[in-house]
Amino acid sequence: MRNIVAVLLLTSSVAAFAQQQASERLSVDLTVYNMNMALVREERTIDFTKGINRVTVPDIPATIDGTSLHFASKTDPVAVKVLEQNYQYDLLHHAKLLEKYIGKEVEFIRTDVEGKKEYTVRGKLLASGWQPQPNYTPYGGGAAYTFGGQMIAEINGKIEISPAGRLILPALPDGLVLKPQLQWLVQSLRAGTHRAEISYIANQLTWNCDYVVLLDAKDTKLDLTGWVTLKNNSGTTFRDAGLKLVAGDVNRVQDAGATVGMAKAMRAMEADAMAPQFEQKELFEYKIYTLQRKTDLANNETKQIELTSASSVDAKKVFLYDGIGDQWRYWRNNPSYRNQGSFGQQSNTKVGVFVTFKNEQRAGLGIPLPKGKVRVYKRDDDGKEQFVGEDLIDHTPKDEEVRLYLGNAFDIVGERAQKDFKVIVSGHVIEETIEIKLRNHKEESAEVLVYEHPWRWNEWSITRSSLPWEKIDQSTLRIPVKLKKGEERIVTYSIRYTW
């Protein structure tokens, strides 16, 4: 009996909940990560009555991670307690709307034969013609639908497939919402207006960096501009938002949300027009860039903001020849290939062209450069910019060298050949001789860095070399080769492996 009374009391109290709606955003701050997610922190006002309130928060991103929600009252944190929080994303859709009327009476507006007069027929809707795709779950949680057939209705005791006429429904069914929204049960000890802070993680908000480089005529100086490209496909627009960008490889647990704290919003401030738009600081083991003003980020919008720029940065064009390419990585330290002289005879003829520069303050840079695509241009003899290549860079700390691979040289050619292979001690010692030919057809001299990879075994030694060489690591050695105009040079070396 007591349980029945308790249920009745709870039912009556639920019906008596005060219905409240949060205001529009008073402020919003975004911390966007370069991994297709963002932390959203917003402030709104909510009027509470004493007791339990049902609060609706409108205009929420369709891509919200509902498990990451955090709510707090800034006015009186102790007086307010959230009992339940729900994310409602059953958005209005043609298929969902028709599903609500399956088995119910609907109207069809038809036109007479002469097409002069409309009339109404009533019938029972039996099938909508839409099919859900349960294995497809887009952001927002709802299943996608596909039109898999035709509508079926019972009209005047007969079954009509794809009935003629314009379908009219009497009302919008309960349970469907026009936009995603939050709904909470909140208990308040006192009545009053509260300034509330809401934070959550939303997907389909991301950023990346794009860089534009202009080389000078001699390839010894460059101008660089870095652009932040922001993409918002979250389903909502953020107006007058504070913006922070986090660069780094932040770990996320798959299929699980996390509530993350967020720093206080930057206050609006005026800055000199030539000052950097972003201020870079540290955040844990990552880099955070704060936009020194507010910005708007509309739904389904791509926005670009300048991150950094520098002019007359010292640069160097570098030619690199790697005769065996990356194939050695598949054979490295494999005992099945160690004694086989036929492996490693492949030859790559292309000589790569690279441009290098240092990310240092005296060059006008000196802030950590987020990973991104670098597009490189150069002016031709007519003074018009031409595209000469692009490359991707990883997160690059300050004072580190940036190396861009732009393509392959047209007028410098390389050849690599295995000239000799000897078994010194069967099953223990082998020796091979490699010959590298480089030909320079340019109208000027050039230096080519030749890279070779001792891949057969960890224990090796160079027994003879026609030019000085440098050991970069256990599997890489480098030989600088200077070529005059029209010159061909041959580099040979012998390497001995012992195991």
Image (tube, grey):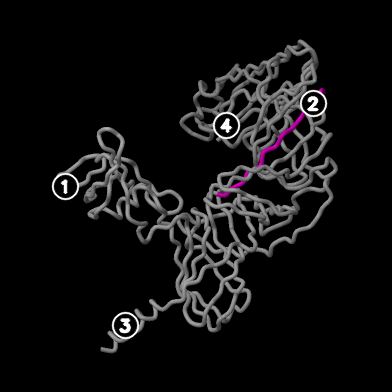
Disc 4 or disc 2, which is closer to the eye? 2
Q: Earlier in the sequence, mark 3 or mark 4?
A: 3
Disc 2: which residue: 219
Q: Earlier in the sequence, mark 2 or mark 3?
A: 3
Tell me the distance, in whole angstroms, between the alpha carbons under discs 4 and 2: 34 Å
Mark seen at residue 156: 1
Q: Is residue 212 magenta?
A: yes
Disc 4: which residue: 455
Mark seen at residue 8: 3
Image quarter (top left, top right, bottom left or bottom right) of the N terminus: bottom left
Q: Earlier in the sequence, mark 3 or mark 1?
A: 3
Provide residue 222's location: percent of width, then percent of height: 79, 32
Disc 3 or disc 1, which is closer to the eye? 1
Answer left or right for 34 relative to 53: right
Disc 2 or disc 1, which is closer to the eye? 1
| Relative height, residue 193 to residue 59 (above, below) | below
User: In the rendered structure, which amino acid carries the disc numbered 2?
Assistant: Asp
- Badge 1, how many Cα within 10 Å: few under 14, some, many 20+? few
| Residue 463 in sight | no
Which residues make up the magenta segment?
A: 205-219
Q: Earlier in the sequence, mark 4 or mark 1?
A: 1
Secondary structure mainly formed by the magenta segment: strand
